[in-house]
Amino acid sequence: MKKIKVIQYGLGPIGQAAARLALQKPGIQMLAAVDIDPALTGKDLGQVLGGKKLGIPVLASIADLPRRMKPDVAVHCTISWLEDALAQFVELAEAGINVVSSTEELLCPDWKYPQLARKLDRVAKKNGVTLLGTGINPGFVLDTLPVVLSGVCLNVKKIHSKRELDAGTRRLPLQKKVGAGITPAEFRRRVKTGRMGHAGFIETIALVAKGLDWKLDKITETIKPKIADRDIRTKFLTVQKGQVTGIHQVCKGIQGGKTLIHADLQMYVGARQSLDRVIIHGEPSVRCVIEGGIAGDEATVAMLVNSVPLVQNAEPGLKTMVDLPVPRWLKA
Amino acid sequence: MKKIKVIQYGLGPIGQAAARLALQKPGIQMLAAVDIDPALTGKDLGQVLGGKKLGIPVLASIADLPRRMKPDVAVHCTISWLEDALAQFVELAEAGINVVSSTEELLCPDWKYPQLARKLDRVAKKNGVTLLGTGINPGFVLDTLPVVLSGVCLNVKKIHSKRELDAGTRRLPLQKKVGAGITPAEFRRRVKTGRMGHAGFIETIALVAKGLDWKLDKITETIKPKIADRDIRTKFLTVQKGQVTGIHQVCKGIQGGKTLIHADLQMYVGARQSLDRVIIHGEPSVRCVIEGGIAGDEATVAMLVNSVPLVQNAEPGLKTMVDLPVPRWLKA
């Protein structure tokens, strides 16, 4: 079997975890990593990952890739926002490298960035490569999974999905990210400045609509704080009664005044449980529960690496999870 | 939008329901139906479905299709067994017609019929058509869905899926099919003569193994009766204590003495609940429950018709649910 030649683009926490996973797959040959951090470039990827040298260089840019290296796929983990990652996608595509990315807004950019989406599709096709945004949320729980489940229906009226996550059992950065321990006023201030909230939620709705061929009039999004009704102590911090425990974000896809897609995301400390739920209201209705929820960080990394062969074998263009064959674990 | 031209091949209960659904889709143009039953041929499809004439003929064979009719896809619902349907698939392929079929053994014939699978793949490719077997079980709950859910995993050790169905809430033919009300001796006799049991279970295991690239040493299958521990009355019949309430069928995919795939199917009257459950034992583990289960007959019909555009747009060859893009409801 011919190995798929991969580069890891971006060595933040998710990028490092993706590299670590990709290195375990016998079917993947890791050629190099790319990161702009001068503290990392010039090192060996193995060292950056806290292990022994692997003979895999960390480069400052793909322009530094030795000519003999012809990567098939870049696993791209840099930033949530499409506009900020755009030049990176174009550069990778023009170098003839397929991309699977954790950039949340790449999941389905048609809605918010139709022009950029067309541009990326053009560049990808011109260079014979595929671009895919994926992950667990966005990328699976509230978008791909509902689309898949709708496949058993004669008719679908509405999709209602929910992800509730007990942030108290998760790492400190996540607890801080959702605002655990801040005041409601501070929460609202952060929302206003765009510094609060889960990225890629609009794209989740857009992807479900694309999969089901629903033409939406609008997508709405609200972000509210969850407030502690008692003191809550986690391993890392304490939230006092009246302070923020986390975030409650709701996104709706609306057509003709009717909500066709309703996605509800709650991430907070003190939740009684973690759980993912998708309800397809239709004929038949489908009520799917993932007990305990799907763990975000490791599953996102899994989705990225598991998608490598699917992206490698896909038709050129800007693709989405509903264009590609069904996701599946990559054994090797 | 160009309509997809469809013929309905086979007008048993599932075929009729599929035709009824396909007729509701604005994106599908039903050209004709085919059935060998002389009581149906020569009639109009609308009449066969118990409605008004539609100007859609029911033909005895695809050889009777008028030359001007160039169907894109046949929705094929005739029989469970690959060998019995083989000539029909070959005939359809040679007529240049893509096929989506409820034939359970077409789901993933590589395991039981490797030579026939290669032959069908050859014939399909030669004639530029796609052949797909699908449905709800086999086709979704215990095979496609587990593969999809494995996509979130860094590692998968084992897949354990279960479908438990309260036959007491279903139509009489299903209650009879699972043996409700017969004696255990009669049940065993029927099993021996191959007249008892759910078709396509081996193929369910084979499809999961294909999706996850697991090379199995063997697939085992057991069929046992469920026995009434009390008298059970349904709308249609009464099962006395000691009689059979239904079927308990287990299929395992085994590699190196280890069970990698374990699928458990229970269909009987008197079940406390209907439910589908998939557990992926891995990193992370995923525990997915479909509360109430997915109703078999209507969902099978939905899977068939929803797959029409996916089959129409697929590469030629004998394909499976893990080769095609994710399933989704066909709106129009």
Image: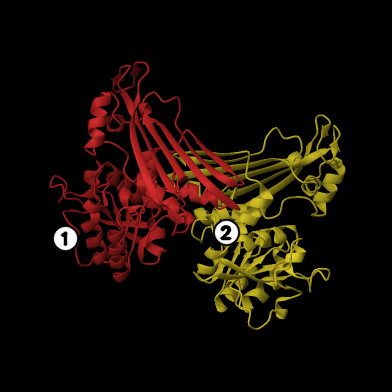
Chain colours: A yellow, B red
Report the disc number at residue A306: 2
Report the disc number at residue A35: none
Horizontal arrangement in the rendering, residue B90 relative to residue A224 (left or right): left
Name the amino acid, label 1: Asp
Displayed quadrant of residue A107? bottom right
Query: How far separated are the C-alphas under marks 1 and 2?
Result: 47 Å
Q: Position of residue A43 (x, y in %)?
A: 78, 71
CB within 8 Å, label 1 to label 2: no
Q: Position of residue A230 (x, y in %)?
A: 82, 29
Question: What SS does tag 2 mark?
Answer: helix
Horizontal arrangement in the rendering, residue B209 relative to residue A263 (left or right): left
In depth, the one of A202 and B162 nearer the eye is B162
Q: Quadrant of the C terminus of chain A?
A: bottom right
In depth, the one of A13 and B48 nearer the eye is A13
Horizontal arrangement in the rendering, residue B284 relative to residue B238 (left or right): right
Question: What SS does tag 1 mark?
Answer: helix
| Tags 1 and 2 on a common chain | no
Instruction: Quickly name the residue at label 1.
Output: B64
Displayed quadrant of residue A59? bottom right
Q: Position of residue A121 (x, y in %)?
A: 58, 71
The mark lying in front, picked from 1 and 2, is 2
Horizontal arrangement in the rendering, residue A193 relative to residue B87 (left or right): right
Chain name for mark 1: B
Q: Residue at x 64, y 54 (%)?
A: A300
